[in-house]
Image (cartoon, helix red, strand yellow):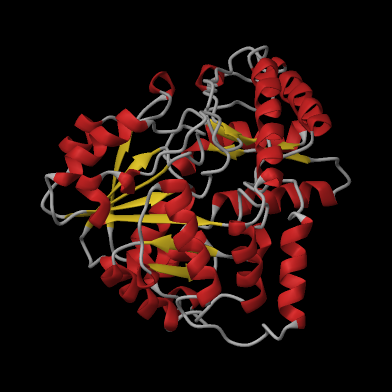
Amino acid sequence: MNRKKILSDRVQRMQESVTLAMAQMARDVANEGNHVISLSLGQPDFDTPDHIKEAAKKALDEGYTKYTPVAGLLELRKAIVHKFKRDNNLDFELNEVTVANGAKQTIYNICHAMLDPGDEVIIFTPYWVSYSAIVTLAGGVVVSISAGIEDDFKINAQQLEDAITDRTTLILFSSPCNPTGSVYGYDELEAIANVVAKHEDILIISDEIYEHINFTGKHVSIGSFDVVKDRTITVNGMSKGFAMTGWRIGYMGAPAWVVAACNKIQGQCTSGASAFGQMGAAHALLADMKPTEDMKAAFLKRKKMILELVNDIPGIVSNDPEGAFYIFPDVSALFGKSNGTETINNTDDFAMQLLRNGHVALVSGSSFGNDNCVRISYASSEEDLREAFKRIDKFVRSYA
């Protein structure tokens, strides 16, 4: 059987998610008898708060075990409308919000509903690995605009203006950002909004999944600016701020016509998200946020600790990110260095050799659109983080 002939060109062109691939490689190395510390996955190491789990259990007992509407249960959509108004100064009607099986599916639905072959999507770079894959899978063309560590990985409005063409359909970015932890402030988002406002056929996808892990004191949604409020799709979900990664509940607020189009896509793919999961999510959005605030405080403490640790390692340079639970340090000073057996030529080499020789898993920046940096998640215990950075320091110093 000629598998290459049978498999679609689409799937053969697709790259596997590098974060999931690295997590699997870390498990493989661990299965060989090594103690591997994984700093590769974007998953809070906290359990879902008890009050959310209890709400889901109660929903199960009350019979929330059947198919759900594609757009989501009314209880959750009402909670989303309330949350958007309360936290983001965004006014949506019920037909302007919809629920999906995670924020990733939300973005997938948007791209498949909005893009025709050749349509361009401007992606602020570095970007989450799945952005480019989803856009390409939908037939779109990725247009990356990049910022480096000296700019805290944040692009400016002029870069955006210069990148827009008559094929530009979507602009996609996250704030707080995965992988960099960068947070766009009010003035920066206002300048971006003013650029988009001049181009009436462009939509913004604002991925705000890390909204609650923001150390600046105030999260700003670009959709709250009047000039783009009718052309912004605000994506969010329960995974990061509520430690609900396995629940697979994402949602968005958007113009009604966008929501209707996305519901058509989802209706032919997965249909609605789980009933009891949605009831747990509805409770989470309306309940006490103290567990989320406590989690954020723990992440901030860890960030301060690991920045001290990483800055003591020669050849690695990090900025001070303002959100999420990642640092994205530059390791390019190590390129060309050898331990006598292996040479680090790029970030892929750095990540693979660190895993094999130092038993620490992190993710190469090449899949995030930056060839000089690596993503390190600090969603791990302080004990594991201290041990991991000891190993990274020893690994780096073994290369002359």
Q: Quadrant of the C terminus?
A: top right
Q: Is residue 14 at least partly visible in the picture?
A: no
**Residue placed most toward the observer, 121 or 347:** 121
Residue found at the far right of this picture: 33
Question: Does residue 371 appear to the left or right of 353 in the view shown?
Answer: left
Question: Residue 273: where, in percent of width, then height?
Answer: 56, 75
Question: Is residue 244 positioned above or below 351 on the image?
Answer: below
Question: Is residue 149 positioned above or below 100 on the image?
Answer: above
Question: Residue 52: where, in percent of width, then height?
Answer: 71, 61
Question: Residue 60: where, in percent of width, then height?
Answer: 74, 79
Question: Does residue 350 appear to the left or right of 355 in the view shown?
Answer: left
**Residue placed most toward the observer, 242 or 338:** 242
Residue 371: quarter of image: top left
Question: Residue 149: where, in percent of width, then height?
Answer: 44, 23
Residue at image coords 55%, 38%? 364
Question: Does residue 217 appear to the left or right of 45 in the view shown?
Answer: left
Question: Is residue 330 positioned above or below 104 on the image?
Answer: above
Q: Is residue 342 at least partly visible in the picture?
A: yes
Residue at image coords 65%, 57%? 245
Question: Is residue 64 positioned above or below 391 on the image?
Answer: below
Question: Does residue 208 appear to the left or right of 143 in the view shown?
Answer: right
Residue at image coords 28%, 60%? 140
**Residue placed most toward the observer, 163 or 48:** 48
Residue at image coords 89%, 46%? 33
Q: Count the marks: how many?
A: 0
